[in-house]
Structures are given as C-alpha cells and as structure tokens.
Amino acid sequence: MQDKTHLVDEITGHRRMRRNRKADWTRRLVQENRLTVDDLIWPIFVVPGTGIVDPIPAMPGVNRMSVDKAVEAAKEAADLGIPAIATFPDIEMELRDETGSNSLVANNLINQTTAAIKKAVPNIGIITDVALDPFTSHGHDGILRDGEIVNDETVDQVVKAAILQADAGADIIAPSEMMDGRIGAIRRGLDAAGHQSVGIMSYATKFSSGFYGPYREAINTKGLLKGDKNSYYINPANGTEAVRDAALDVEEGADMLMVKPGLAYLDICWRVKEAFGLPTFAYQVSGEYSQIKAAAMNGWIDGERIMMETLLAFKRAGCDGILTYFAPEVAKILAKR
Ligand code: PBG
C-alpha cells in the first residue's frame, strides 16, 4: 500500500522513467548509443631515427615514435580492429623554415611513415594532415609574410604537399590549417594527379583553442609559435560561423567533416551532423586527453570511466567516430566486453 503522504501526483505516478532503468538487462535493451572499435581513429606522433619510443611528458601514455616503432604501433592498432590512424611528425628543427619547405620533400618524415605503414600494415587507413605547422620555423599552419599568414600561397603549397602525401600512400588527406578555399583546391589537385580515390576529411570547424597545448609540446611548436592562430582558426564564441565554414567545405567536396576540439564543442558536432549529414568526426585533442589523465593520476577521477563517458558523449552528439589518443586503450577494453 502506497503511503498517501508522498508528494508524487497521480499523473506523474504513471510515468516512471525508472522502469526502463531498473535492471542491467533493461538498461542494455534501451541504450541509444554505443561505442565500438569501429569508431576510433588513433593519432600518433613520429620522430626521425630508429628504435625510438619517447614519452611525451604532457601526455602521459603517449609517445613519439620512430618510423619502425610507428609501424609496430600501426600493426597493433590493426590487430585491435582500429580502422585508421592519423600521423603527426615532429621533424628536426634544422629542417623547419619560414615557408615549411620540408612539406614539399617527397620522402619527408610524414611520407616515409605513410609508405612504411602502408607496406607493412596494408589494412589500416592512414590519415595525414597537410597543415604546415610541423615544418615552419614559426609554428604557424601557413606561410608567414610581413606578419601575415598568407592564404592563397599557403593553399598552393598545401595542395602540392597533399599530392605527395597521396603518392606516399595516404588514404585520406586531412587539412587542418583553415585556409579559405583549400578543400576545393586539394580535391582538384588530387584528381589531376590521379588520386580520385583519396578522400578529404576536412578539419571543417577548427577553433582557436587552448586545448592544443600538449600537442604543441609533442611536435615542438610550443616554443616557436609567436602570437596566436586567431586570424585563421574559428573564435570559440561562434557556432553559426563554424557551420557556415563547414558548409563551404561540403560545397568544395569534403568527404568527411571534423570538429576540433571535441568535448567543449558538442553543440557544433550536433549542428554540423544535422546540417550536412556527412560522416562527422570529433577530435578529442591533446588537452582533453591530458586533463583526464592528470586528474586520474591524482586519484581525483576514475580515468577509465570518464574516458568511456566522454567518447560515448561524442556518439550521442551525432559523431560517426572520434580521433582520440585513448584509441588503443579503449579498443582493449571494448575487446573484453
Ligand atoms: C595544427 C594542429 C593542431 C593540432 C593538430 N594539428 C593545433 C595547433 O597546434 O594549433 C592539435 C591536436 C591536439 O591538440 O591533439 N595544424
């Protein structure tokens, strides 16, 4: 007999949300979103040399690897069922210059990595960034002239770099430098070079964010960068502008879209997916990873639980997948379930 002094009214009394939550089996039955290994893209950092596995202090558990070790990592990722990796080079300081000219060297570090992984692990997808920041002496994503990041000249160079990356075996070109008109230019360049099947994953909405801090340490652009990237990345205050920017990339021929950073921009993930219906990915960037790791290492949060919760949040926000440094860790956990 229900105690009549309870305040739940009669109508509310019929609508019990908790019925579907009452047991593990009901909860599993009504679960709307799921994270699987197929959702994961693993970003890795590559350095020159051999036999190198160099921990990145600001990203506990993440290493810079020489090409041979990157190949081993790619093999491990493929064995875990991770569909694709994204590679980022930390190139020698002597090779960095004002225009990022090393990006136009056919067998530069990033292209060596692609070729080696393609050969040894043909069944994993390789996604390469064409921004110039790993190659410039000032850490900017484009060519710097008289204090300005010049758009069209940068696009010309990025197109050439993209073709070399495709020549080396890259499956998807992911331009992150946010220059205007780059998607169309890269598409035309790839097609003219016979790379019709190489896709473009646009960093469509890349925000000028503090969350990239640890990444800049990883590829050693932190000390180089003067000023900020506000003249080409999107203002974190602007959602509608971000959707407009993505619309241009769709028009220009992007095959997939990315939102970056991830967790602070779930509204953008949702809006972009709703607006265009393209495969949409979130990049859970370095700062997001490091925050979780640091708090977990201090015993302040349950790191594994929050890792899984954040990744599921991306799925709920409409993402088809996530670029995450957690990828191998997550894949191992998912394999056990
Ligand atoms: C730059 C680039 C950035 C990241 C990847 N490529 C941002 C930046 O340095 O400004 C960030 C990735 C991360 O933080 O994990 N083209």
Image (tube, helix red, strand yellow):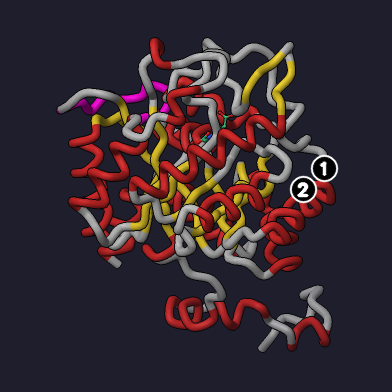
Q: Amino acid at mark 1?
A: Asn
Image: magenta residue range: 51-61
Res 98 quadrant in image: top right
Does residue 304 show up? Answer: no
Q: Residue furthest left?
A: 51
Q: Which residue is mark 2?
A: 242
Q: Residue furthest front?
A: 192
Picture residue at 69% right of the left edge, 20% below the top:
228
Asked whether the residues under the numbered discs 2 and 1 touch, taking CB atoms below 8 Å apart as contact, a structural biologist would say yes
Packing grade of label 1 (10 A; few <14, some 14-19, many >=20) is few
Picture residue at 34% right of the left edge, 51% below the top:
169
Instruction: State which quarter of the image contains the C terminus.
Output: bottom left
Residue 132 colored in magenta in the image: no
Gap in Å between the C-alphas at discs 2 and 1? 6 Å
Is 213 placed above or below 70 here?
Answer: above
Instruction: State which quarter of the image contains the N terminus.
Output: bottom right
Q: Which residue is mark 1?
A: 238
* Of residues 318 and 194, the one drawn nearer to the viewer in this rendering: 194
Q: Amino acid at mark 2?
A: Ala
Residue 336 lies, in percent from the top left, at 26, 64
On the rendered structure, is 49 left or right of 60? left
Q: Magenta segment, principal secondary structure?
A: loop
- Give the quadrant of ligand 1: top right
Which mark is drawn over residue 32?
Answer: none
Q: Look at the numbered disc 2 and give the secondary structure of its residue.
A: helix
Q: Look at the numbered disc 1 and give the secondary structure of its residue.
A: loop
Packing grade of label 2 (10 A; few <14, some 14-19, many >=20) is many
Residue 238 lies, in percent from the top left, at 82, 42
On the rendered structure, is 289 left or right of 85? right
* Of residues 324 and 65, the one drawn nearer to the viewer in this rendering: 65
* Of residues 285 and 149, the one drawn nearer to the viewer in this rendering: 149
